[in-house]
Amino acid sequence: WPTNCTGHVANYPCGWTSGMESNIFHFKMALDPNNGPDGSPSGYTSTQLTEMWHAANATKSNLIMMWWTPEPLYQSYLGTDTEMQHVLMNPYTLECAKAKEQYLEESCDQPLEKRVGPPEASCANPSESLSKLTTGSLYDFLHPEGIPEAAISPAYDVLRRFQISEVQLGQMFDLWESEPTPRDAVCQWAVENLEYLLSMVPSTYPRILQEEPHSTFGYAMIGLGAAASCVTLGTAILVYAFRKKPAIQYAQLDFLYILLSGSFLACIGAILSSVPASDGTCISIIWFVNIGYTLELLPLVVKVAAINRMMEAARHMRRVTLKRETLHTAVAAIAVLMAIYLAVWTGVDPPDVAAEFQMTDSKSEYGEQIVGVSYFCSRGDSNAWSSVAVGWNVLLLITASVLAFQTRNVVSTFNESQTLAFLIYSHMLFVLLRASLLVFQDNFTGTMVDNLRALLISIDQIAACVIYFLPKFIAKDEHEPSRTSFEAPSPPVGFFPKQNAAHRHPGRISGIGNEPHSDSSAMQHGSSSIHYQGGGHTEGPGHSLELNKESPLGSSEEANTGEQQSNTNSNTTSRSGVLNLCSELTVEA
């Protein structure tokens, strides 16, 4: 090591890579090798080096030390008489890089031979390129799944395009000296270089949002919903006009009005699904549609169940009383349960308005890219609420189909199994389509989902009116006597205690319409009678099933057991009440 040192050299702190000792040793520079403040090779801290340069400038002293650019200290002395002068070393080569990597160990606890390495390791430091560092999750954060391209932030693309030179970085360091904080320095540089920064912005930015006008398809669905509402109201008017028609009375006038009220509510929900979305309409839709379908389907279930119960009682000669109020209460109770469910849904996870964005080819007068925005009703945080509501409709339809099948052998006056089968098939088809729309809604835009839902509900209601009510309106009133008979099981032995076993024959149930008989009440109302008659001479207790004005299918229905004497030579006379649906059912033994 040279002994003719003429000065001191200030190195980086111990552990920093500099290569200074290697260059001084192999180039035989007459500088003090002990480059630390305490005469050791530990070097100086960056703060100490900065203070040393300021002191050398104040005292006009010579100083040689390691430093880097771009950096605020270097920038602050540019253009002054104490500007830093770069000392050139041998150029950085691949051989030098390999030698540095293989032999050089710049650590304070290493001996001199390890710190200086072989001559091949003495060269200038490589030029460090300016690099951008971004976190790996930034892209995923700025491009979340399910967000359309039109709504994605351009931040990631701008960062990817952003390039800055060493000179520009030096300008920021210059501003650092004059601005109060580094942030202010960067912001001031951005203001002065705004045109350069704008060149890195993607071509479709800046963007401006513009609300899209309501679509033609949306207006068409509003019109279809209004048409379905008119069909429902028109059907209600025709039901009232034909209220004395036997087909309407047998179907129960009050139950028909409950059904039509539910259908009308569903039509209102369809209209709201097509109008521009708001928080109010989104919540109203689930209420109108779900309450509507409940009121539309539930009366069918209750009514058919009551008919089945009545016929079962008739077959077993038992008394059963079904009051109209009881059936109405059942409909109201289940509707209230649905309302409670909807209230919980509204309170916990209410549907709300969501926006969807669509890129357009248009630009504003200021050159901004126009992004169309439209609003639709989202289903909240979970689809489970909607799935349960659709499942409830499916449950009602399955129950109604089972009960309708059970009425297939009921007397034709009350038998709606075929009509109900078509109606349930129609409802089930549209409910399944609504369920499919719920599953695949991510494949459509939000407004399209709302409009398709309105389409399905509207057509469903129109089809229901046509399938269930049209046959009742066009049905011909039967003025000719009609008779339907089927064999019933023989009464058990001992059923008629005074009857000889030889005279017991299978009974017969007959349906007689508008046929003159001794019951003046039945004649006045043009009623139908079902008589159960025992064959042969009978003298014993009889049993009768009567539907009177208090029957639930007229008003209430009773199976009465009473004592009666009959003579084989006398005509059988039925004791019957009259349904308010103008139907009389009497079973006598």
Image (cartoon, rainbow, N blue to C red):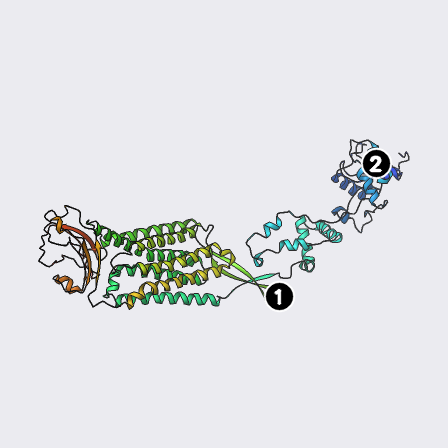
| Rendering coords of residue 290 (x, y %) | 38, 55
Q: CA–CA distance between discs 2 and 1? A: 61 Å
**Image height of 82 relative to 296, above or below:** above
Q: Between residue 579 and residue 563, name the one nearer to us.
A: 563
Left or right of residue 458: residue 242: left
Q: Classify mark 2: helix, strand or loop.
A: helix
Residue at 63 percent of width and 53 percent of height:
156
Viewer can see residue 409: yes
Residue 438 picture location, percent across and down: 46, 55
Of residue 238 and residue 581, the one placed in the foreground of this image is: 581
**Quadrant of the image for the N terminus?**
top right
Q: Quadrant of residue 41?
A: top right
Res. 367 mark: 1
Query: Residue at horizontal 13%, vertical 51%?
Result: 503
What residue is shown with label 2? Answer: 116
Disc 1 marks a residue whose amino acid type is Gly
